[in-house]
Image (cartoon, coloured by chain):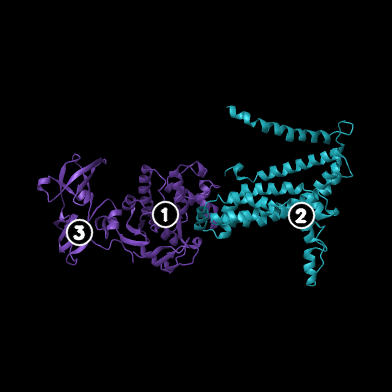
Chain colours: A purple, B cyan
Amino acid sequence: MENIISLKDIILDFEDNSRVLKNISLDIKDKEFVTFLGPSGCGKTTTLRIIAGFLEPTSGDVFFDGQRINGVPPHKRNVNTVFQRYALFPHLNVYENIAFGLRVKKVPEKEILSRVGEVLELVNLKGFEKRSVHRLSGGQQQRVAIARALVNRPKVLLLDEPLGALDLKLRKEMQIELRRIQQELELTFVYVTHDQEEALTMSDSIVVMNNGYIQQIGTPTDIYNEPVNAFVADFIGESNIINGCMPEDCVVEFAGRRFECVDKGFDPNETVDVVIRPEDVQVIPAEKARLTGIVESVVFKGVHYEMIVDGVDHKWIIHSTKAEPVGTMIGMAFDPYDIHIMKKTPEVQE
Amino acid sequence: MKLKYFSAPYLVWMVVFILVPLVMIGYFAFTTDGGDFTIQNVSDVGQYANIFVRSIWLSLIATVICLVIAYPVAFILSRMDKHKQGTMLMIVMLPMWMNFLLRTYAWMTLLGNNGIINNILGAVGLGPFQMINTSGAVVLGMVYNYLPFMILPLYSVMVKIDKSLLEAASDLGCSSASTLFRVVVPLSMPGITSGITMVFVPAISTFIISRMLGGGSNLLIGDLIEMQFLGNAYNPHLGAAISLVLMVIILVIMTVMNQFDPDDQVLI
């Protein structure tokens, strides 16, 4: 697959001289579902707006289909955007909102009719043509916004937290629907969200961002199982992050004890971050364990219980299908491959 | 609700100062000095058709000029930083804090045959130009005095247009010009109609501006009405009839205007 969008060394400063993007380089492959994931203020929406053309980078190049498109205004770019709060035109009905882009391009009326019909079917809104956009629910407005962008047959669809305003159930439905539309139309989707679960569910590839830097790019499985640093580990799912050191290959020392692990290639006694997922902590009887702690709280989460366990200088989060009573001493054990060792360069900062 | 009794003063106000005068205008318009019914007054208004046409024409021109000047100003204003908007709005409002007569007098001294502008032009060997006592001067006076009334309603509607709508239009292929005509103009229609109303109505009935800047040859309806009540031609019955006809004309024009208000528009 070839790259449809490439960003090369993008730097963006705002008017007040604060640096929002600090060297973003990134390739987006054709027909891929890419998600920009990060906390608010990390630069993910800003990056999307640079691709759309609403912002010009202070330095660096934007390539679309191999051509440099710096300075090309948004209306001349072959991308369309689904805006965070939909941005539907209040003076137009559903049909006219969707037909807007085609009208601007002077597409013949007959073709407009058939193309609007097509996308309305795609987003399950047949029969809503004459409805005023004020009288649509949030989910329906969302679908109109998607239809209005898709009707132009862009090569790339940019989605800026499009499901942020919807309730949980509707959001899950729309996640599946968006994924279906993307695969059915074989389009490139660039999706911005701060919701890690959403990112894991929908994406082919996830770009984790923080502080204007890309922290990690990878498939959802890679990002979840092999986070490159403590920030990614913490942001994608819950994690126990403990200070440790590596006395030798495949041995890690934390909480005053040595454990077997599978990582190697660290300097002798290098200090590291040890990341262990809550579901990878095994609860065993305290007398058999090398590491113990006292259960502080237990919360029922549906599939599992979440326990906070006070161990040696760390409060452990443990997900388990069996709950232990608060106040009991329990033991904790880990399989070697569940212990992830990360270099102490906490985040990409340069 | 007891609260509704609080509106009583307003009701009294309406009756005493709006309803009663309207009835009186109607009464005077259709009676003779002796109090007998007549339509003579109303039919006499026809003699002044040329003054009506001139008033409508000049105030129409002034309204259009106001719209053309105010629209970009209001749009730029509405897109500025919030804290700059306040300052700029104050500058727009500033002339309104000065007395209306004073402002118009100022234009008399500026435009006069021996006025400041002609003096300056004379110093570089141009002119003098006849500027005062022309219909152009009347239109200028109207535009100058009523421009803020056009800017404010436009601004207050435009400031509510979300920036993302403009971005969406641009994203969907609109250049700046077509964004203006496809999104900004339709969404600012309520501001356009109320701005036109707020400029056109006072402009068509003004008499001070035409008196001071138009000389004797640019009489407007307002001057005509004033003459019937306070001038040599004293005839309150004719004055009332002219006022009545003017009211009907304004009413008709406003009804037509309101057809453009998108809230009343039938959806396609």
Asked if residue B223 lies left or right of residue A295, the reply is: right
Give the number of callouts: 3
Of tags 2 and 1, the one toward the viewer is: 2
> Mark 1 or mark 3: which comes first in sequence?
1
Say which amino acid is labelled 1: Leu
Depth check, front residue: A228 or A108:
A228
Say which amino acid is labelled 2: Thr
Q: Label 2 belongs to which residue?
A: B104
Can marks 2 and 3 be said to lie on one chain? Answer: no
Q: Label 1 belongs to which residue?
A: A159
Say which amino acid is labelled 3: Gly
Q: Residue at x 12, y 51 (%)?
A: A290
Can marks 2 and 1 be said to lie on one chain? Answer: no
Q: Position of residue B12 (x, y in %)?
A: 70, 31
Which chain is disc 3 placed on?
A
Depth check, front residue: B23 or A79:
B23
Q: Position of residue A278 (x, y in %)?
A: 23, 49
Quarter that holds the C terminus of chain B? top right
